[in-house]
Amino acid sequence: MTDLSVNNLVKSFEIGRNVLDGLSFTVTAGERVGILGHNGCGKTTLFRILTGELRADEGEIAVAPNKRMGLISQIPVYPEGFTTEMVLKDAHRRLYKISERMEELTVQMESDQSPALLREYDKLQEDFRRLGGYEMDVDRARVANGLDISPAMLEQEFASLSGGEKTRVNLARLILENTDILLLDEPTNHLDLRATEWLEDYLLHFKGTVLAISHDRYFLDKVVQRCIEISDGKAEFYSGNYSFYAEERQRRFEEKLKKYEKDQAKIEQLTRAAEQMHLWAFMGNDKLHKRAFSMEKRIEKLSRSEKPTEQRKLNVKFKEREFVGDEVLVMDGIEKGYSGRVLFSGLDALVTGGERIALIGDNGTGKSTLVKLIMNVEKPDKGWLYLGPTVRTAYLPQLVGFSNEQRSALDTMLWDCRCQPQEARDRLAAFGFRGEDVMTPVGALSGGEKSRLRLCMLMGGDINFLILDEPTNHLDIASREWMEDALSDYEQTLLFVSHDRYFIDKFATRIWELKDGHITDFRGGYKEFSAWRERQALVTQIEKQKEREQPKEKKPKPERPKNNDKAIARLEREIQRQEEKIAELDKLAEENGSDYQKLMEIQAEKDELDTALMELYERWEALNG
């Protein structure tokens, strides 16, 4: 069954240039599709047309009946004073209306037991159960916990959140609404690794349809089943994930290039033959003119094909300073905190020449702070940190700034790097700044362009310890590949903070995971680290299972009471006490509906009480038998 059909979509924002130019595709129910293409090709425009925010100039869109569509990047405006928790509860507004009506009917049925009221109540109760009304508090806590929406954030006004936090909350709201067709526009941009992995797991089990625009290649590999590339306003289809797309796209390019070269050779051959035919025709054989004209028509047809082009790759290399010695970086007992909160303590590490270290961890664990300590931008509260005497560092921060935002990219290179104009232009061109681009003021550049320019400037210095803080954060796939090209030949020490698992997997030979104030130091790449982490989780799970299955001490069988009536009365009092305890836990669960961890603890205690209660029921039945 088709969930979404797009037919011959056309959209332009300026005369003579169509962003979408006859775009057509269909998506079947339950498919997970990646929407790919360079920046400006029309991916976000397509999503805005699908949700009705923009109107197409031509074409048709058909959505399956009764299917709801939700776009993550569209953040609704809520009334003043609306907290994050209210936003999440708004996803269950239908259930709350059903609950309110059930309460009204309960009051009415105290004095009116008419069949009509009973039927309405029964129907509402069944709808409430079917739509997950009894689990909605637990669901909210589960989704909030998975997307790093803390209890403090739940209490905050939604309007006061940052753009990234609003995106996370909006994603949680759409998940809780059970939207049928999810449109995800860069969903992992504001998520750390743990939250990204949670989202991936959710989408893999999601029964609805997903269309995702993303520059996170690892995410695309894991989640999407096929890719649609928007190129020149039209759709090109690839029946696999991102890795399949990248390989197949290259194969198709090589095929097109071979065909073009073959056509050029044919044009050359036909041109020579046509010229010869015309020459012979002038010597008395007029029929040969006709054959020559036929050949020229074929030449004209073959000449219409354009030479296929691919993204230009970087041809640049870092100027490296040879490292001499055994120690690049030594940390001993490092501790750092702010406002009474300790971010990390007791950090010890030794880094030697040529290592490539990925520093990973959840948002707020102190990764950027640790980088600032290494760069001597900040001082540790305790411990000491030492860089080897021949170490020369270069640092690419997460938010790139320049001394004068009014200077052009070219003037910034000339001023800060002290290089000749031609060298500056050559280096800028290698990083995609060509023609008039070099005259753009650096303050007007996008975040990704600023990162590219700063990296271009760093490459001119003699360095042997390169530190990058979220280097791919604002970059599209092409720019990420440019950066990877630039780093691929760098052989000195590299330390980088990143959530980009594709980038981590490509470069890291050592993983530092900063968690709960301590570093887990793993020597190996990201795939090996992920496999090790899964094994550790499995071992922990098995140990907990063994603890639960430990044989309990057998309780001595109670002597059969001589007076059954007294024994039954005691059991009934005990049963009442157990039922009251369970009722108290149910009330406590309602009060802690937003605390996922607390709910799990309450449920575990309730399970124990339920088991004990069943035993009491069995004894009561035996005495009454």
Image (cartoon, grey):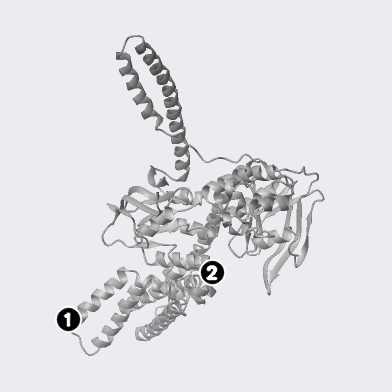
Of all residues, the one furthest to the right in this rendering is 389
Q: Specify whether 142 is left or right of 105.
A: right
Task: Say which residue appears at 75% left-offset and 68% top-offset.
Answer: 381
Task: Say which residue appears at 49% left-offset and 62% top-offset.
Answer: 549
Amino acid bearing label 1:
Pro
Amino acid bearing label 2:
Ser
The quarter of the image holding the C terminus is bottom left
Task: Say which residue appears at 52% left-offset and 67% top-offset.
Answer: 163
Place residue 490 in its image quadrant. Answer: top right
Q: Position of residue 493 (x, y in %)?
A: 71, 47
Q: Position of residue 261 (x, y in %)?
A: 46, 27
Viewer can see residue 535: yes
In this view, the residue in front, 17 or 430, is 17
In this view, the residue in front, 392 or 430, is 430
Q: Position of residue 513 (x, y in %)?
A: 62, 57
Q: Which residue is mark 2?
A: 162
